[in-house]
Image: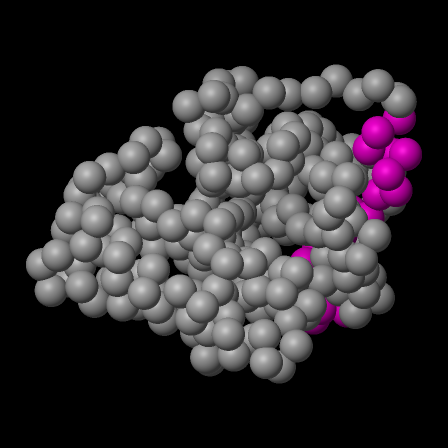
């Protein structure tokens, strides 16, 4: 496995097809599932490990975000990754005033309201990584649904020669969506966090039983989540526009919940 630290190393890579999995490290089984998909569909797999400062707000967890680089590299090697890109901040941001990107207004709200500037930072770093890695396909989890939709729009709007692949959310055996930030949770907080997948499964069961109206579904979810700080719980379409009832194949239930000091995102694709 090749360790790339600068653009020159990446430019030297050549393959008929490149599958790319961008990460911030602290890899878990969810990331490994993206890597497996990339391996199955491409001749060469590149993983990036970079905690991107421009997508963190002033009072967020940039300094505390886990950075177990050696463990991550071992996991990548065992998973059969061909190259890992581990740049320094100054490598990806050589200028003090970097060129920025503005996410489309029709895909804002939710995380954009709660984390101003977050998606500008995401677009900025992902575009840089796409330009350096030059992937055929790039793999992202559905757990970060709004991010996924915004990145798909960027690729379409800027005519980028890469296909963004949406991959299903992976969950622990207790149902909690895999996330690097789960490491912040105490044992008691993790038990509380299990109300999130429980709320989603309750709404899914109700939908499968014939309930499609927004108010009815979200009320059921809110009842399960009620002991927690729910930042949003919404039914929207795949363009993040509000819906009054489920449109099969075009609907999302999005939620962000705060457990202690940890924000957890999850969703249900309907």
Is residue 108 rendered to the left or right of residue 102?
left
Residue 148 drawn at (x, y percent): 48, 40
Counting from the top left corner in percent of width and height, residue 60 is at 73, 47
**What residue lies at 35% left-to-right and 68% top-to-bottom?**
224
- What residue do we see at 20% from left, 39% from top? 244
Camera-side residue: 191 or 71?
191
Please state the extent of the stretch shown in magenta in the rendering: 73-94
Horizontal placement of 127 versus 152: left or right? right
Rendering colour mode: one colour
Q: Farthest residue in the left direction?
A: 210
- Image position of 230 with respect to 234: above or below: below
Q: Position of residue 209 (x, y in %)?
A: 11, 64
Quadrant of the drawing holding the N terminus:
bottom right
- Tally of marks: 0
Quarter-wise, where is residue 6 in the image?
top right
Q: Can residue 39 be seen in this view?
A: no
Q: Where is residue 266 in the image (x, y as percent from the top left)?
A: 45, 56
Q: Which residue lies furthest to the front in this view?
A: 227
Q: Which of 220 and 148 is in front in this view?
A: 220
Queried whether the magenta region covers residue 88, the answer comes back as: yes
Q: Nearer the viewer, residue 98 or 262?
A: 262
In the image, what residue occupies the spot 43% across and 48% down?
A: 232
In this rendering, the answer to whether 57 lies above or below 206 is above
Residue 245 visible somewhere in the drawing = yes
Of residues 163 and 225, the one nearer the viewer is 225
Q: Is residue 126 magenta?
A: no
């Amino acid at each position: 496995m090749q360790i790339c630290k600068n653009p020159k190393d990446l430019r030297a890579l050549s393959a008929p097809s490149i599958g790319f999995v961008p990460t911030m490290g602290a890899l878990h089984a969810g990331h490994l599932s993206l890597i497996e998909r990339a391996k199955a569909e491409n001749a060469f797999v590149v993983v990036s490990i970079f905690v991107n400062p421009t997508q963190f707000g002033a009072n967020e967890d940039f300094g505390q975000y886990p950075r177990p680089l050696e463990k991550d590299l071992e996991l990548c090697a065992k998973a059969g990754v061909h190259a890992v890109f581990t740049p320094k901040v100054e490598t990806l941001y050589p200028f003090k005033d970097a060129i920025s990107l503005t996410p489309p207004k029709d895909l804002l709200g939710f995380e954009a309201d709660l984390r101003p500037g977050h998606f500008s930072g995401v677009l900025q770093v992902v575009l840089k990584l796409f330009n350096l890695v030059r992937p055929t396909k790039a793999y992202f989890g559905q757990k970060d649904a709004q991010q996924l939709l915004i990145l798909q729009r960027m690729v379409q709007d800027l005519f980028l020669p890469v296909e963004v692949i949406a991959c299903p959310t992976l969950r622990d055996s207790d149902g909690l969506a895999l996330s690097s930030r789960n490491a912040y949770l105490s044992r008691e907080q993790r038990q509380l966090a299990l109300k999130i997948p429980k709320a989603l499964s309750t709404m899914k069961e109700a939908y499968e039983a014939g309930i499609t109206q927004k108010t009815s579904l979200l009320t059921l979810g809110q009842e399960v989540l009620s002991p927690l700080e729910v930042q949003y719980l919404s039914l929207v379409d795949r363009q993040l526009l509000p819906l009054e009832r489920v449109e099969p194949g075009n609907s999302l239930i999005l939620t962000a919940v705060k457990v202690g000091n940890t924000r957890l995102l999850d969703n249900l694709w309907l």
